[in-house]
Image: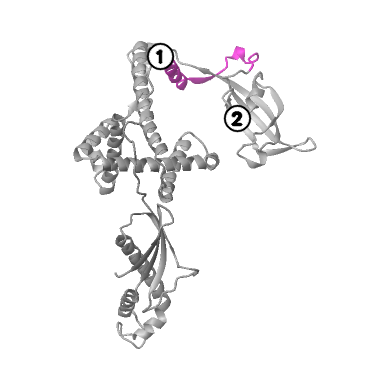
Amino acid sequence: MNLQVQIEKPSKILRKLLVTVPAAEVQTHFDRQWSEIQKKAKFKGFRQGKVPINIVKQTYGADVKNDVLRDVIEASYWNAIEKEKLKPVGQPTIEAPGEHKHFHIEENQDFTFLASIEIFPEIEIKNYKGVSVKKEKIKITDKDVNETIENIRQSRAQLVPLASDKVSSHKISKTDFADIEFDGGVVQADGSVERLDSMKGTRLLEIGSGTFVEGFEDQIIGMKIGEEKTFRLTMPKDYHAEELKNKEVEFSVNVKEVKIKELPKLDDDFAKELNYESVKDMSEKTKEGLTKQKEQEAEDALRNGILEELVKKNAFDVPQALVQSQMQNDVQDMMRNLKQQGFGDDVIQEFLKGDNENVSKRAENKVKAGLILDYVSKTESIEATEADFDSEVKKMAEGMGMDESKVREFYGSKDQKTNMMYRIRENKTVEFLVENANIK
């Protein structure tokens, strides 16, 4: 295809291609379309395939122009990319050149369009060997072990009602669970209260947990079962419901029941329920687990620290298409994690909206880190081998308790295996950077 391509370079990663497709090439696309339609066209008075071309053009002209326009742009765009040896990122923006609003394509005429694309940046990473980073020194104390075991006990705790002889005298305190019925509304300018259905309901509330409106739980402390109380609060300025932000509200609360948390006794029987031999065995293995966990966290922090230093010391522009793609992946992961923690869609959207700038910056840094690793791996000839692939499959199978053949089957497709090989190469490159770092 004998194209004419003029290139502008507004930045290191942006290219604008003014592509002119010669009339002969445009006509080839038109002729192909006319021929296909003429073979299939059925008109009264003509045999199929024998309809005069002028009738075909008169009837199907507009549709053919649209099809030719699409085909010419697609074919010539990729031809221009190959001709200029460009590596585009994401989809191009295709426009009519100059001040034209719409494309206009005709038979036996040249056709010109403008394609704006982002390309992978040409980068040079300096001083990637000998990066100075600190690695946390790991020390697991008895306090750490005891806190972990206590958290396990807390997770196994049961809520039990107050003993009957304590119901009348018990005053609610922090860590109690109060089963309450509440009714609330917004305080008006004249002092009256406009009750709202959204501020009405029942709830089992852990006092002191901070899960309800700020100040609400403090008002419950000291109440007894069967007691009613009315009080006023000021809602937070950043409250998720717009109509309640920074508003004075009134709540009426009735305590229906109080439950207390009953922890399992820490003895050998409890340890055996958790598949340990004894409390001593539980403590020793908990310490081992914490040590491995902290060592892995320190190793991850070390790796991230090296990449952060390289990103900081090597400034270069990155294609926004890559950043947007990384942002989408990160947001999906965050939404999945927040949903698993029990947050609703409204709260999640509000959080993501407020954290959008940080999400964008983190995504950009991840893209930069990926490009840096790609540069180092190519410079140092670091590759993922079949032996690496086999080793990773075996490790994954052992970690997930699956048959190795099932894991290998999952990574049997070209795309899945390519992705794994890419991850393996990245990990090997990070290991290379760690081995050559100045670690304190």
Q: Give the residue at x 54% y 43%.
A: 353
Query: From this viewpoint, is residue 56 visible?
Result: yes
The tally of labels here is 2
Magenta stretch: give its range: 143-171
Magenta residue check for 206: no
Amino acid type indicated by mark 2: Phe
Q: Quadrant of the C terminus?
A: top left
Residue nearest the viewer, comparing 256 with 9: 9
Q: Which numbered disc flags the more N-terminal residue, 1 or 2?
A: 1
For disc 2, the marked residue is 212
Amino acid bearing label 1? Thr
**Residue 403 seen in the current view:** no
Q: Toward the viewer: 122 or 194?
A: 122
Q: Position of residue 48 (x, y in %)?
A: 30, 82
Give the vertical position of 195 relative to 269 (above or below): below
Q: Secondary structure at mark 1?
A: loop
Task: Please identify, in this view, whether the residue under mark 1 or under mark 2 is nearer the observer.
Answer: 1
Residue assigned mark 1: 141
Q: Mark 2 Cα within 10 Å, few/some/many (few <14, many 20+)?
A: few
Q: Quadrant of residue 87?
A: bottom left
The answer to if 156 sits in the magenta stretch is yes
In percent of width and height, residue 28 lies at 31, 75
Quadrant in the rendering for residue 203: top right
Within-10-Å neighbours for mark 1: few <14, some 14–19, many 20+ = few
Q: Residue at x 40, y 14 (%)?
A: 141
Tell me the distance, in whole angstroms, between the alpha carbons under discs 1 and 2: 34 Å
Q: Residue furthest left?
A: 387
Work out which residue is located at the far right of the displayed protein and give it. Answer: 190
The residue at the point 36 percent across, 18 percent down is 286
- Relative to residue 310, is residue 206 depicted above or below? above
